[in-house]
Amino acid sequence: MEVQLVVSHLQSLGAHLRTIEAQIISLTETFLAEISAQLGLSQPLTNQDFPWDGPLALGTLLAEIGDIRRFASIKHLLSFLGWCPYSRDSGTKRPTGLKMSHQGNRFARRMLWMMAINVVQRVPEYQLYYQQRLQAGKNKMKSLVAVGRKLLSVIYAILKSGQPYDPQRYLQRHQASANG
């Protein structure tokens, strides 16, 4: 009897979670349509226009970013979110390595971090970039930070241009910079 009650409760929770996930997807799509209208795009952006599948992370990040037009460049957006190095120089004392700023929104940074981990596992061009950094002797954590920066650059470019993510264009640019 107890097992049946637990199974029934778990099934009910599963159905509730599926309903919430559908609402999150719908709200993210609505938010993207509003952003597209504000930017005057002919076709609204969708969740599929970005290099990963995660409407919750994307919606959270976009909500924290707000109006993309207020950022003159990607560097301004990186600084706003605290995804940039911060020097803590003091007089003649110089630290040996730069640390992350952590002055931006911690929820947005956490979402960006989770998105970086997600694309390294699932998106081939980001896997390649991550592996190349590791083979060059870079630290795993710093490589994930670099992947997060690339992701934020892609988000910025998609929102500014209204053009969906195109892995071929990304690969061509990345291969040209690796060969050049």
Image (cartoon, rainbow, N blue to C red):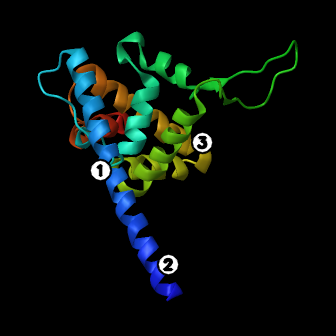
Disc 1 residue type (three-letter)? Ala
Give the labeled residue for mark 1: 22
10 Å crowding of disc 2: few (<14), some (14-19), many (20+)? few
Give the left or right position of residue 18, taking residue 57 as reference: left
Residue at the spot x=39%, y=72% of the render?
11
- Residue 69's place in the image compared with 154, above or below, is above
Residue 124 can be seen, yes or no: no
Instruction: Specify the quadrant of the image occupied by residue 92.
Output: top right
Label 2 sits on a secondary structure element that is helix
Disc 3 residue type (three-letter)? Lys
- Residue 41's place in the image compared with 167, above or below, is above
Percent x, y of residue 136: 54, 47
Disc 2 residue type (three-letter)? Val
Task: Tell which circle, 3 or 2, labels the residue nearer the N-terminal end.
Answer: 2
Q: Which label number is shown at residue 142?
A: 3
Percent x, y of residue 176: 31, 35
- Residue 28's place in the image compared with 132, above or below, is above
Give the labeled residue for mark 2: 6
